[in-house]
Image: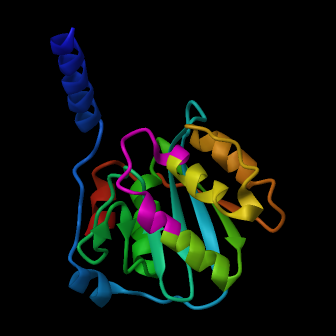
């Protein structure tokens, strides 16, 4: 019985490792050098990458513009860039150029990006930033769920229901007073998208 239990535990660990992307951990010096402050207004921005044919949300991410810096929490995301050092799914140095690169890395003929802006206080933005830094690294398929977990720890957003689905998260987020929404489309082919990672 003990052997069976140990084998099951080992299999569980292997499966857990298999569904987690490689962890990128830049150095503290790299993170400090890349720090970018956008200034007010402070906000959180929810991204949802939506399949144009099926209408399903396939990836979620959260940009946090706090007084100290602006970062992107991209849980289990595939986007990387040498000018945005990453630690546990948090990308630093997330200036307007990186925002453009990230958006159009995902916007293509098959997908568009639903982007929802919400202005918050500087104190709330800093708190959400700290929560994001503590959340990762995130396993595959847990992108929306990890963002929900962060938001649920903020009293104003504690009512948001748990979900694995980016559309469900976006639809709930859209009901918050003050949310401003845009959708970004692109006709770029997959090969053309490479320019947005350079």
Between residues 34 and 131, which one lies in front from this camera angle? 131
Does residue 91 lie above or below 149 as drawn? below
Among the 4 quarters of the image, the one containing residue 9: top left
**Picture layout, residue 17 above or below residue 47:** above
For the C terminus, the image quarter is bottom left
State the residue at coordinates (23%, 34%): 18
197 over 14 or under it: above or below? below
Determine the residue positioned at 43% across, 67% down. 133
- Residue 128 screen position, x and y as percent: 57, 69
The percent position of residue 155, horizontal first and vertical second, equals 73, 63
Residue 114: % across, % down: 61, 54
Is 140 part of what is drawn in magenta?
A: yes
Residue 45: percent from left, percent from top? 60, 66
- Please say whether residue 88 is one of the residues in the magenta stretch: no
* Residue in front for this viewpoint, 94 or 163: 163
Q: Is residue 183 visible?
A: no
Figure colour scheme: rainbow
Left or right: where 167 falls relative to 10: right
Q: Quadrant of residue 153?
A: bottom right
Quarter the N terminus occupies: top left
- The image shows residue 134, relative to residue 167, as above or below, that is below
State the residue in front, 31 or 57. Answer: 31
For this orientation, the residue located farthest to the front is 2
Query: What span is colored magenta in the figure?
Result: 131-145
Q: Is residue 86 left or right of residue 73?
A: left
In depth, the one of 18 and 43 nearer the eye is 18
């Amino acid at each position: 019985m003990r052997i069976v239990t140990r084998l099951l535990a080992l299999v569980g660990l292997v499966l857990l490792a298999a569904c987690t992307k490689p962890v990128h951990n830049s150095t503290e010096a790299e993170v400090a050098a890349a720090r970018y402050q956008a200034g007010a207004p402070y906000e959180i921005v929810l991204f949802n990458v939506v399949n144009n044919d099926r209408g399903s949300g396939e990836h979620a991410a959260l940009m946090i513009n706090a007084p100290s810096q602006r970062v992107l929490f991209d849980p289990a995301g595939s986007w990387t860039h040498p000018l945005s050092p990453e630690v546990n799914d948090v990308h630093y140095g997330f200036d307007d150029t990186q925002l453009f690169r990230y958006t159009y890395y995902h916007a293509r003929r098959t997908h568009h990006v639903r982007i929802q802006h919400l202005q918050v206080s500087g104190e709330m933005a800093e708190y959400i930033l700290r929560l994001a830094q503590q959340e990762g690294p995130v396993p595959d398929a847990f992108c929306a769920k990890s963002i929900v977990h962060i938001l649920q720890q903020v009293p104003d957003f504690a009512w948001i229901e748990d979900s694995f689905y980016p559309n469900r998260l976006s639809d709930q987020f859209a009901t918050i007073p003050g949310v401003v929404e845009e959708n970004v489309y692109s006709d770029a082919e997959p090969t053309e998208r490479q320019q947005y990672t350079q």
